[in-house]
Image (spheres, grey):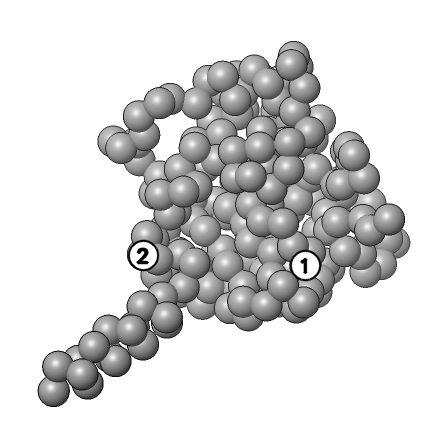
Amino acid sequence: MKKLLGLLVIALVMAVPLSASAGYIGDGTMTVYASDPAEGGYYLDYDANVTLAAVGLNNALLEIFCVSHDSANTNNPEAYSFYTVPQNLLSAAWIADNWTGYVANNDTNKGEAQKAIWKLTGVMDIVGTSGNDYYLLGLVPGDLSTYNFSGWMFAQSPTINAQDPNYQDFLVPTTVPEPATMLLLGSGLLGLAGYGKRKLFKRG
């Protein structure tokens, strides 16, 4: 019996997803769009149409942030599992939630926030020793244990396979932005219509 119990425990541990420290919200779909600005050969602005019944999102146009190394299939709806923000992404989620309160709300500064998030998540370090990316990093509180992250989710591809083009993970807001913000975002996405399918990361 002890041997059987031990095998069950091992099986459960092996079945735990990367979002182990996060709470499951539900399964949905995202159509991800990557666009300029770019730096170091990488797009810095990510947006998505998100459908997630669990929080009442129905093809909602949202500003999102990339938090993983791998590439994703853009401009097509893909399946994602959504979770509350895990412990290892709290600092990144704080920047996602607060950057517009410290720098101008535009695509250039959203790209600066994305660079700061990549540095925090260990994806890459293209942050200099000055500029808004460096500034935003310096603002992250040391203790986020009492911060309310209910406005953000962690979206993870259910296929955990580095060779799979749907592996990229994101921080996603739980609500639709203000109408004026949506109008600006929609106008920007219209410019992407002729770009066709692209990988989020350019390959050399």
The answer to whether residue 109 is above or below residue 46 is above
Which residue is situated farthest in the left direction here? Answer: 1
The quarter of the picture where residue 75 lies is bottom right
Cα separation, mark 2 vs mark 1, equals 23 Å
The quarter of the picture where residue 42 lies is top right
The quarter of the picture where residue 31 lies is bottom right
Task: Kindly identify the amino acid type of the residue bearing the numbered disc 1.
Answer: Ala
Image coordinates for residue 91, horizontal then vertical, percent: 43, 32
Instruction: In this rendered view, identify the residue nearer to me: 31 or 81.
Output: 81
Which residue is situated farthest in the top direction here? Answer: 130
Image coordinates for residue 153, horizontal then vertical, percent: 43, 49
In the rendered structure, find residue 32 and report the number of the disc placed on it: none
Residue at the location (58% across, 29% down)? 116
Residue at the location (41% across, 64% down)? 17
**In screen coordinates, is 45 left or right of 157?**
right
- Residue 102 visible, this orientation: yes
Q: From the image, which quarter does the N terminus lie in?
A: bottom left
The answer to whether residue 40 is above or below residue 171 is above
Image coordinates for residue 2, horizontal then vertical, percent: 13, 81
Image coordinates for residue 33, horizontal then vertical, percent: 70, 51
Residue that numbered label 2 is attached to: 23
**In screen coordinates, is 200 left or right of 177?**
right
Residue that numbered label 1 is attached to: 72
The answer to whether residue 10 is above or below residue 135 is below
Instruction: In this rendered view, identify the residue nearer to me: 111 or 87.
Output: 87
Instruction: Tell me the SS state at disc 1.
Output: loop
Residue at the location (50% across, 47% down)? 172
